[in-house]
Image: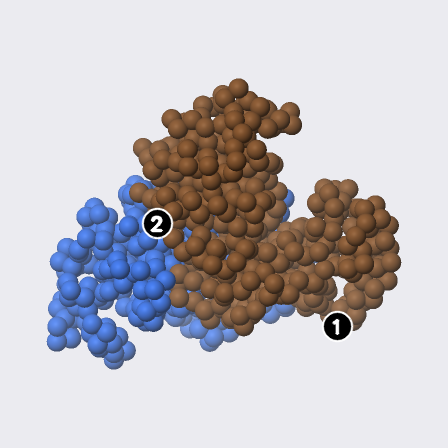
Chain colours: A blue, B brown
Amino acid sequence: MQTVPLIQVGLGGVGRAVVERVLAAADEFEWRYGLRLHYVALLDSRGAIVAPEGLTYGDLQRALAAKSAGQSLATMAEGYRHEGAADIVDVAGTTGAIVIDVTASDDSVDALLLALERGYAAVTANKRPLTQDYATFRRLVGCGRFRYEATVGAGVPVIASLAENIIASHDTVHRIEGCFSGTLGFLTTGLQAGGSFSSLVREARVRGYTEPDPRDDLGGMDVGRKALILARTLGWPLDMAQVQVESLFPPALAAGSVDDFLQATGTLDADYQSRVAGARAQGQTLRYVASLAGGSAQVGLQPVPLDSPLGRLQGTDNLIAFYTDIYQTSPLVLQGRGAGANGTAAGVLADIVALARRQR
Amino acid sequence: MQTVPLIQVGLGGVGRAVVERVLAAADEFEWRYGLRLHYVALLDSRGAIVAPEGLTYGDLQRALAAKSAGQSLATMAEGYRHEGAADIVDVAGTTGAIVIDVTASDDSVDALLLALERGYAAVTANKRPLTQDYATFRRLVGCGRFRYEATVGAGVPVIASLAENIIASHDTVHRIEGCFSGTLGFLTTGLQAGGSFSSLVREARVRGYTEPDPRDDLGGMDVGRKALILARTLGWPLDMAQVQVESLFPPALAAGSVDDFLQATGTLDADYQSRVAGARAQGQTLRYVASLAGGSAQVGLQPVPLDSPLGRLQGTDNLIAFYTDIYQTSPLVLQGRGAGANGTAAGVLADIVALARRQR
């Protein structure tokens, strides 16, 4: 039996789902893989609990309960405040540890780099450490002990298929096209069905598909980050500023409250309606597409043929199409739910298992 | 630099594509993975060439040329006859070797088991060793040094997605549906478009989509084997006899020459035409589907909704849909070219890289 110490940074929705999934998988992973996963440290933004011999089931449940009650781990009896996740990695680290970053913060990069330096492995569901400067990306992924499946398409095995199937089979990627936002998928299929932009944005927000401020989705930066991660995985040395990102609202609407914004979206309805009609006249429909080709990446609203993988995509599913030497006329396509705490946690767990099995 | 000795059994179309792909990838894999793949033995059905220090580029090219000229490796200057692939594994094996089975024979199972017993790794594109008794399947896959991506969907990462994403993330599979035959995909989309069964079978044969005797495809056993491999990967202890396989021709047409068969297919046209019309009346279309659910597996012609992943599938592409706890209403779908020597060789190469990197 191989014991795998886990250090998890982040206890939001995804972080909670990862802890719960690790606990649920414990028995199965022992017989299936000979792996015993145990937490040695759990961190939120300010606090931590640490137990080098392993946090107990009770410790973990009390930590989740504290978070549900809106408290930081720092307030727990055994908890304390930390000055940065790297400090905790320093304290808690043991041979073969895996550091799990399920924050949405730029700050976790120090903890990840320290972990890799010490010879630990690391997993992230957080796009930010991968979308800083290119040198940082290389430092993270170059060591072969770092995985990031959940950063693109949540649990859909986008990164594994690209890195461990296409690239590892000496195939050549000519072009990638994908839809990586459930929110914008809902919006574009709604536009296609005749809905107005303003009412669809409101509906997406009510359904919980958007961030509290829907501009965080409509601005396209989240999709842009995913495109950058794919480009860098292909070995393209791009920076975030080189990814063209089309926002679905004009700069004038960036300021002001959410209510102001929702009010103002009505002024965009006619324009979107005419773009949809223009596409339809060509046998096309609009999708918010990430496109990678010829060393450059862009994301934005694009007309795509109705009879194409992206055109047939409906609703909130994510989809990626790889056009390669082997998949030339008909691409390799992956499709599935690309968001949600459970799917994201599943991607994280698959990465943990892959790293633990490779460490043997 | 990690040197990985390769022992390849089989030099047909896929075998040749694997050798060529390994040679083409050599430089890239050195810088990308620190892996130096080199062949120590190459086998066809009767002959072999062996060089424990590594066959040279010239050796490999001369072997491919001999095969192109219709000769066995046994006729080469340095070649000799073998009495079974296991003998060669015995002679050629060295620490960290990977045995590659690209035959279509039941016989290679001895070589694979011997390789695993010796601590080597093994890769197969051959469904037969995996579809013998369940105990043999367990012996092969149980050691964790055996991969078989190319057996289902060629290079499409079906097995990796199931084993290393879905199962390794503690997700639960409720149902799998897939189309795993390009030939039968061509046939069923042709039927949907109004073609007759007999003319579509002829056309598929002329285009090279079928085996020389199209009954080898139309009988469904090849798809049945893939369904069995998926079922066993899920941990279902099924045997081939327990997989229900619907043949697309009646037993009466099993005897006789290929020409006799092609002649006789005309008698089936009316029946297929009425099945297609019956499906259409329900908003459905026919596909040759492998279905796994509740511990059992079946393959056969099924009506599927036009507006479903399988119903939308056109032409020769393969498709698999996984319905799981995480992908409940909308499945995780993979689609792509599931046949051809290059795609199959790509699946084999990805497996080789995965095994070599895990052996470190």
Q: Position of residue A318 (x, y in %)?
A: 51, 60
Q: Which residue is identified by label 2?
A: A131
The local secondary structure at tag 1 comes to loop
Q: Quadrant of residue B244?
A: bottom right
> Residue most toward the front?
B83
Compare residues B94 and A305 and report the one nearer the observer: B94
Point 64% across, 25% down: residue: B69
Point 15% across, 64% down: residue: A53
Point 46% across, 37% down: residue: B87
Protein chain holding label 1: B
Q: Amino acid at mark 1?
A: Gln
Q: Amino acid at mark 2?
A: Thr
Q: Which residue is identified by label 1?
A: B282
* Quarter that holds the N terminus of chain A: bottom left
B72 horizontally vs A254: left or right: right
The local secondary structure at tag 2 comes to loop
Q: Position of residue B265 (x, y in %)?
A: 83, 54
